[in-house]
Image (cartoon, rainbow, N blue to C red):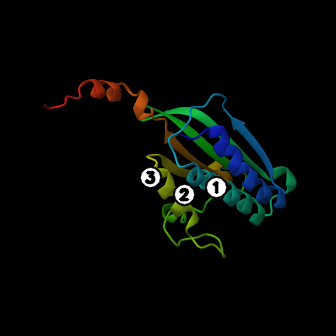
Amino acid sequence: QASVQTLVGEALELAGIEVRRRGVKFQQNIEPNLPDLMVDPILIEQVLLNLIKNAAESIDMANRPPHQRQISLTVQKAVVEGRPAVEFIVQDSGPGIANEAMPRLYEAFYSTKTEGMGIGLSLCRSIIESHTGRLRAENLYNGAAVTGCVFSFWLPVTLSVASSPSASSKNSEIQVSP
């Protein structure tokens, strides 16, 4: 089990260096009392770090003025496909994702950056899906103008096996043959 607050704190400690270096304002809104998640914390921290660093790079590459250099992270409870989940939302004020790039965004070795290797988002998607979650991207618009991008992912909240009702009922049904 991993604490969401710890996951976020560790990722932000590392991402903060890149965000400050690029002169980007960072805001976070973490809902209180989020449930622990059954995840590999290092992998989820890596996803958050990658998404935040990508956002900071995007804003910097677009040469946004200081008042338009913003990233926000929101972490909140959600219900996805009828199941409880925790949703992580990274929103930036960068130039967004080109329409032609959107279908290839998660392809291995595809990059929109001149010096990008094209494995970051592919790896992020694989990590989230290996935890039975989903990762998605969408541009933000003000009329026809792109005003930024949002990457969001959710991870299911799962009960530990020891506390699940089915586990305790299975234990009571165990029979030992003579």
Q: Quadrant of residue 86?
A: top right
Q: Which mark is residue 130?
A: 3
Q: Residues within 10 Å of mark 1 (few under 14, many from 20)?
A: many
Task: Establish if 87 lies above or below 165.
Answer: below
The location of residue 81, given as percent across then percent down, is: 41, 35
How far is mark 3 from mark 1, CA to CA? 17 Å
Residue type at mark 3 is: Ser
How far is mark 3 from mark 2, CA to CA? 10 Å
C-beta proximity under 8 Å, tags 3 and 2: no
**Which sits earlier in the primary sequence, circle 3 or circle 2?**
2
Residue at 78%, 47% in the rendered image: 26
Residue at 77%, 53% in the rendered image: 16
For label 1, the residue is 51
Label 1 residue SS: helix
For label 2, the residue is 124
Q: Which mark is residue 138?
A: none
Give 14 or 128, whichever is nearer the viewer: 14
Label 2 residue SS: helix
Task: Establish if 87 lies above or below 127.
Answer: above
